[in-house]
Image: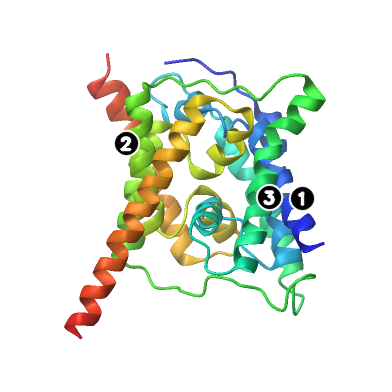
Amino acid sequence: MIETAFTPLQSLGGGALIGLGAVLLMATMGRVMGATGILAGVVQPSSLSDWSWRAAVLVGMISGPLVVLLFTGEFPAIQVPISTTMMIIGGFIVGIGVTFGSGCTSGHGVCGMARLSPRSIVATLTFMITTGITVYVVRHVLGS
Amino acid sequence: MKLFFAYLSGLIFGVGISISGMANPAKVLNFFDIAGTWDPSLAFVMGGALIVTFIGYRFVLKRPTPFMEKGFQLPTRRDLDLPLVGGSAVFGIGWGIAGFCPGGALPALGTGRTEVLIFVAALLAGILAAKFIQSMLANRATAQA
């Protein structure tokens, strides 16, 4: 386990920007900022116009850390406290879950919750609970 | 022009993810580890994102159309079903193991870190596997009907 510093202001500011990106996409393109749908739509496009806006959002997202690098001189911190095997297993499980669950933290947790969608509220509560249980089991039951 | 605004939306989102800590698995996992190395920062990320989106959507969705497209494309379903709850439960298990969610990992690709590439590759494999299962289930349903 790696200890991380409590960063309320930075996290609040970052969160506000996440919201601003979502609002801008809705205002201009009329679309939900859901990372799952954007990634799936880039890999399995249904038409060129459907692919191009998602690809543009994705390239924008990937440029995010580079802009941070430009302004601060360093990339955002990425500390990985788990093994490569666990990262592969975790990633695969996330892919299965978000596809059947029709969304993730951005689509359900931010955009859907902001629209007070009952499906998104239930989805968000569900995954927050199972994430908490998983972290507890991995770290305090199975772990040392 | 459309694509510029799509890019800009993604960029603002990606900068937000980067500075919020959502792209850092250690920080994300610590938010859920109340019994251990707890870091409550993630609540502020969700809070900030929700406040801005909630207020922003109120203004945006009052308009008849978005600025660049003919209409808003919003999810319309309101029913709660097993795939929604089961899928979300499974997503949480994966998130609790990896510490990356799709929204955190996609911007993190920009750092070029191997761990992120591995997560996104596994994520894609999971998405494609689930879509394959979904199409098989749909085919069986139509065959039976």
Chain of the residue where label 1 is placed in the rendered structure: B
Residue A14 in percent (x, y) is at 69, 37
The chain that hosts pointer 3 is A
Select label 2 or label 3 by which is in front.
Answer: 3
Q: Name the residue under label 3.
A: A19
Q: Distance between the Cα atoms at labels 1 and 3?
A: 13 Å
Query: With B140 as the anchor, is B44 left or right in this view?
Result: right
| Percent of width and height locating residue B76 | 51, 75
Residue under numbered circle 2: A133
User: In this image, B135 relative to B79: left or right?
Assistant: left
Disc 2 or disc 1, which is closer to the eye? 1
Is residue A38 something one can see in this rendering? yes
Mark 2 falls within which chain? Answer: A
- Residue carrying label 1: B8
The amino acid type, in three-letter code, at marker 3 is Gly
Q: What residue type is labelled 2?
A: Ile
Determine which quarter of the picture holds residue A94: top left
Q: Along the line of sight, which residue is nearer the eye, B7 or B87?
A: B7
Q: Where is residue A1 in the image (x, y as percent from the top left)?
A: 41, 16
SS class of the residue under badge 3? helix
